[in-house]
Image: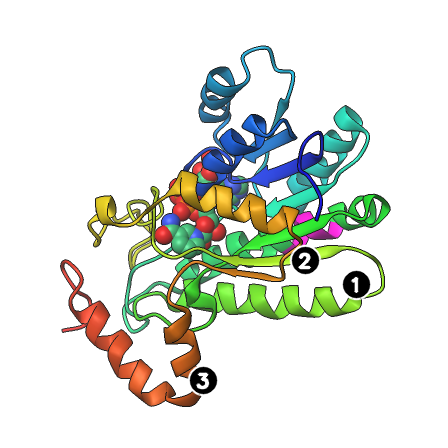
């Protein structure tokens, strides 16, 4: 168990959704937060509302698909705070298109953001996190355990995250570095509204009733608690489904198909 107070925490994708909620909760808990994303105006608005005097937050403009931008994020964090205790790889995008119809560039964008973004940030942060015996967290999804129709690129990027994180955890077994794989369930954020369609444009509408899914603030609190308790995994969607998938994957395939065939304006017809 560690306490997040006064720890230096980098949050990628802090301009919206779960990342924004993480920044808000971390400031409440008196951590020192590095807020990273591409949209600096949004980051500044958030900073203004949670840390007007800029005592507990800094902003580093970061595009996680660009290795040099991720290197700069880590260097700026160390230059400002002298150390890094926690890296939360949260930045991510989604998609909604059948594989038969999607431009392959969409899948490349998903991998560049969700997988390579995490790899770049982790690569440059790792020496500092080893020094502080800190934590690396990856925000994945149930889509990293089970393929979800219309989300080939999203599921592939999250499965890749799982392979990377699991291997890294084993490599670091004797280094006193904590590694968390967190899988929120459906959470009320922008992710589905800005998910890429078959042509790589944002789809604009969520196929879900967002008011019925988990609020981002609740997810953020659970992620921070999991980091403080040095948990290995955090799964906030149906554990029963994952368990059943181990034993009866064909049955779960059908269940997943039927579930996605019932979403608004379904892709599966
Ligand atoms: N919402 C859900 O239902 C759900 C469920 C399971 C897992 N997740 C995961 O949770 C994480 C956060 O998603 P969210 O739901 O909070 O989505 P969101 O509201 O759309 O926020 C995504 C964040 O990622 C950032 N981002 C996207 N591309 C980036 C890039 N190239 N470089 C830097 N930052 C980038 C965005 O910032 P800029 O646009 O300003 O760069 C934004 O701050 C994702 O990894 C997602 O897969 C979400």
Mark 2–mark 3 CB contact (< 8 Å): no
Residue 112 lies, in percent from the top left, at 54, 55
Q: Which mark is residue 94?
A: none
Q: Residues within 10 Å of mark 3 (few under 14, many from 20)?
A: few
Seen as rendered, the residue at the extreme front is 1
Ligand number 1: quarter of image: top left
Query: Does dot 2 land on a helix, a strand or a loop?
Result: strand
Image position of 227 (left or right of 105):
right
Which residue occupies the foreground of this view, 246 or 207? 246
Mark 1–mark 2 CB contact (< 8 Å): yes
**Separation of disc 1 and disc 3 at Cα?**
27 Å
Identify the residue under disc 3: 246
Q: Residues within 10 Å of mark 2 (few under 14, many from 20)?
A: many
Q: Which mark is residue 172?
A: 1
**Separation of disc 1 and disc 2 at Cα?**
9 Å
Q: In this rendering, is residue 64 above or below 156?
A: above
- In primary-sequence order, the first of circles 1 and 3 is 1
């Amino acid at each position: 168990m560690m306490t997040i107070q006064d720890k230096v925490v980098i949050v990628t994708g802090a301009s919206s959704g779960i990342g924004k909620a993480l920044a808000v909760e971390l400031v409440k808990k008196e951590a020192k937060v590095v807020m990273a994303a591409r949209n600096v105006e949004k980051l500044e608005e958030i900073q203004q509302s949670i840390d007007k005097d800029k005592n507990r937050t800094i902003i580093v403009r970061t595009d996680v698909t660009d290795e040099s931008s991720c290197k700069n994020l880590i260097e700026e964090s160390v230059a400002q705070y002298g150390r890094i205790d926690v890296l939360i790889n949260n930045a991510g995008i989604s998609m909604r298109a059948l594989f038969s119809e999607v431009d392959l560039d969409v899948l490349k964008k998903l991998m560049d953001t969700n997988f390579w973004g995490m790899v770049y940030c982790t690569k440059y942060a790792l020496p500092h996190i080893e020094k502080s015996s800190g934590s690396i967290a990856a925000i994945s999804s149930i889509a990293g355990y089970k393929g979800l129709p219309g989300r080939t690129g999203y599921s592939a990027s999250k499965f890749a995250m799982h392979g990377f994180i699991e291997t890294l955890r084993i490599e670091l077994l004797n280094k006193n570095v904590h590694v968390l794989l967190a899988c929120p369930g459906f959470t009320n954020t922008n992710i589905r509204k800005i998910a890429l369609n078959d042509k790589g444009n944002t789809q604009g509408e969520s196929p879900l009733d967002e008011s019925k899914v988990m609020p981002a603030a609740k997810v953020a609190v659970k992620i921070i608690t999991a980091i403080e308790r040095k948990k290995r995994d955090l799964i906030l969607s149906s554990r029963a489904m994952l368990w059943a998938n181990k034993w009866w994957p064909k049955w779960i395939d059908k269940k997943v198909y039927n579930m996605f065939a019932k979403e608004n304006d379904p892709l599966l017809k």
